[in-house]
Amino acid sequence: MKRVLAVAVGLALALATTACGTDDNTPPSARRGPTVTVSDQATLSGAGATFPATIVQEWIKRYKAVAPGVTVNYQAVGSGAGIQQLTSKTVDFAGSDVALKASEQDATGGPGNVVQVPWTAGGLAVAYNLAEQKGLKLSPSTLAGIFAGRITRWDDAAVRADNPGLRLPTTGIQVVHRSDGSGTTQVFTEYLKAVAPEVWTFPTGKDWPAGTAGTGAKGSDGVTAAVKQAAGAIGYSELSFPTQAGLGVASIRNRAGEYVSPTAAGVSTALGSATVNPDMTLKVDYAPDSTGAYPISTVSYLLFYRGGAGTAEDAALKHFATWALTDGQELAEDLDFAPLPRAIVAVALGAVRL
C-alpha cells in the first residue's frame, strides 16, 4: 500500500510511543495497542456520521466479546448533529466525516480540547436506479452537471459520451441529496468543487446548497431508500448502503483517465496521496494521479474530549478506539470499507493514547 507523505511518517514516529508496526506484512492482530484496564462496568454513548455507521455497529457487536462489561451505543444522526451533541457534552464521543471547523473548536473550549482521529475509510458511492442498467460511468464534469441540475435526462449527450455502447433511457434524472447537516455532503461538494469548478459553482459544506436540483432525505439510509423508490434517481452515500439495497454504483473517472469503482483497493490507493495535518486530520487529494485510485475517497473521524483520565469511561473509550484502529480494521473490506493505511493508524493510536 502506498504510504502517505513523509509528514505522516514523521508524525507517526513521534506519536506512536508504543509501536503499531509499519511493516505492510504485519497483520492488524499483531499490532494491538497497549493493554488497557477496562472497568467491569462502563457505558459509552456516541452519535454522529451515518457514513461509518455500518462498520461502527459491527465494531460494537464484536467488541462486546473483548470487553463484556463495556456497553457502547452509537446513534447515526449525521455529522452536524453529532458535533452538536459533542459540544453540548451529551455524548462521550462523536463521529464526523469532516474535521471540526474553527467555530466548532471554540464551542468545545478551544483548539486541542478534542481529540479527532481517522478511524475508518471508504469510498463515497454514487448510487443510481436504472432498471437493468449496470456499469454506469461518469466523468467529473458530467457528475457535477447532474447534481448542479444542468443535466436532467439519462440520455443526455454528456452521459452518453461517458458510456459508449450503453443503452441509456430517456428517463429524467431525479437527484437525491442529504437534507440534514452531513459530513458526507461536505466531502461530496468539496470533491465537485475540486474537480469541476466551472460546473459546480455552488458553495461546499455540511448543508446541501440552496438553488440546486433535487430532493432531500435524512441520513445515508434515507438517501438510499429515496433512490431505490424512484426510477431514474441518483444520490450519494457510503458504499455499504447502496450495496445492501441492490442499487447500481457508478464508476467515476480519475485524473489518470480510468473509470474506477469505490473498492477497498481504489480507496487505499487514493488515500496514499493524503497529507496528515499537524492536528492529525487528513487533507485528501480528490484528483489523485495514482493508477487505480477512486477519487471520492475519504476517512471518517472519531472525536472525544481530552481529560477524564482515571475514569472508567475514559479507559473504556480509549480501549475501544485502540481496538477499532487495530483488530477492527480487519472487518473493513467485508463491510465495503477500506482499512486505514498503517502510517495513519500509527498517528491515530498515538493521539488516542495521549
Image: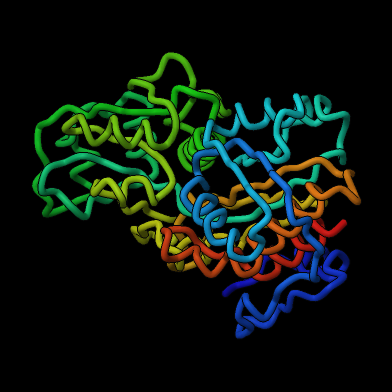
Q: Position of residue 343 (x, y in %)?
A: 70, 68
Residue 162 visible? The answer is no
Q: Report the side of 208 relative to 240 (left or right).
A: right
Q: What residue sits 58% from the left and 28% below the top? A: 205
Measured from the top left, where is residue 114 in percent x and y?
A: 81, 40
Q: How many marks?
A: 0
Residue at x 12% of width, y 43% of height:
131
Choose between 325 and 146: the one closer to the eye.
325
Between 260 and 156, the one nearer to me in the picture: 260
Foreground residue, 323 or 259?
323
> In x, y percent, where is residue 46?
64, 39
Q: Is residue 337 left or right of residue 136?
A: right
Q: Position of residue 145 (x, y in %)?
A: 34, 32
In the image, farthest residue toward the top: 211
Q: Is the N terminus in the top left, top right, bottom left or bottom right quadrant?
A: bottom right
Q: Indicate the quadrant where residue 156 lies.
A: top left
Left or right of 165? Residue 127 is right
- Vertical placement of residue 84 versus 302, above or below: above
Q: Is residue 2 above or below residue 97?
A: below
At 38% across and 59% down in the image, what residue appears?
257
Tell me if I can see residue 12 in this picture.
yes
- In the picture, which quadrant includes the C terminus? bottom right
What residue appears at the point 16 percent right and 41 percent down from the top-left corner? 130
Quadrant in which residue 211 is drawn? top left
